[in-house]
Amino acid sequence: MFGYIMPRKPELKVREWNQYRAEYCGLCKQLQRDFGLSSRLFLNYDLLLLALLFDGLHAKAPSFKRERCIAGPLKKRWIVQETDGLSYAAACLVLLSHHKLRDDVADEKFLKRTGARAADTALARSYRRARVRYPELDEKLAFCMREQAALEKEGCADLDRAADPTAQMVAAMAAGCAQNQTQRLPLFRFGLFLGRIIYFLDAAEDFEKDKKRGRYNVFIKLGLERPAMLENAAQQCKMAAAELSASYYALSFTQNKELLDNIVYLGLPSAVTRIGCEKQRSIKHDESL
């Protein structure tokens, strides 16, 4: 889905790394509580940012408990207990997964289309629950996915227009973390520019595959070769990162600030420096960054 929103592990303190892992396990548990066992199949690190933002702006500190994990049942580990942020992030994860799968059903070839259809069927009940909780967000994500599909069909060669649906989706989810109206605008702008970074990183990573398969890519439509594409994508990401940082600076956090600072000021810039390379699937082996 995304794959770029991670902390820079070597710069985390031990307690921060332990908290991050506990939050990740907490999101997994929250998915099962709210949406059933099948929803845990779609767990990823990216949407954990929403939980950290949401709870970071809230006055109530999370509680931790040692529990067994489905991925490692022989050993107990620290897990963050239910929070409003984890609940919101779980719902966003289900909604986004559903709409991405529906897009794959429409666009992919037979094998991937069949797999996406099967996965969406498994997620159907979870999606209905999430849609009831956040109907406006669901409509916004669906609208943005349709807009993205229309732009690709058109062969859009405008960077701003091409990136806007992804930016609007991330902005809508980020704005939902606001505890009051004062926080809503900076969170919306934070998500807007984060979405632009995600879009350009993803387009740069897929450039060669899209070119080989004749698939849409905004940089291909611009007629760029790989060196120029990488330079252009990096420039777009750096401009967006400056605006993202300004919006982030306007927010006041009561907790999670160390983790969020790491992701915003170290994790994302690290992803930009690796632009055009395959994105990380995990941060376990990220010691060389």
Image (cartoon, helix red, strand yellow):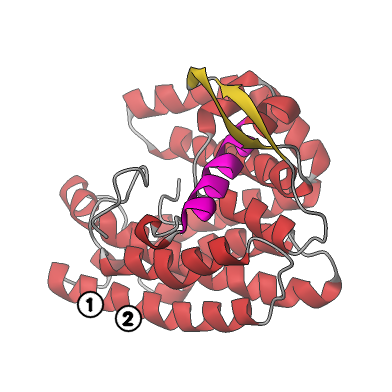
Look at the picture and state if 103 lies above or below 204: above
Placement of the N terminus among the 4 image quadrants: top left
For badge 1, the amino acid type reads Glu
Residue receiving disc 2: 235
For badge 2, the amino acid type reads Gln
Task: List x then y, in percent, for residue 112.
Answer: 36, 28
Q: Residues within 10 Å of mark 1 (few under 14, many from 20)?
A: few
Quick one: 44 or 227, which is closer to the camera?
44
Q: Residue furthest top?
A: 74
Look at the picture and state if 170 lies above or below 40: below
> Is residue 164 at all visible to an observer of this figure?
no
Magenta stretch contains residue 189: no
Q: Residue furthest front?
A: 14
Placement of the C terminus among the 4 image quadrants: bottom left
> Is residue 250 at all visible to an observer of this figure?
yes
212 left or right of 59 in image: left
Q: Which residues are magenta?
A: 13-28
Any mark on residue 177, and which?
none
Please give the name of the residue rendered at 21% of the width and 49% of the height, measured from the top-left corner.
Answer: 209
Please give the name of the residue rendered at 38% of the width and 79% of the height, measured from the top-left corner.
Answer: 238
Task: List x then y, in percent, for residue 167.
Answer: 54, 65
User: Splitting the image into 4 quarters, where does residue 252 fall?
Assistant: bottom right
Any mark on residue 231, and which?
1
Q: Disc 2, disc 1: CB below 8 Å?
A: yes
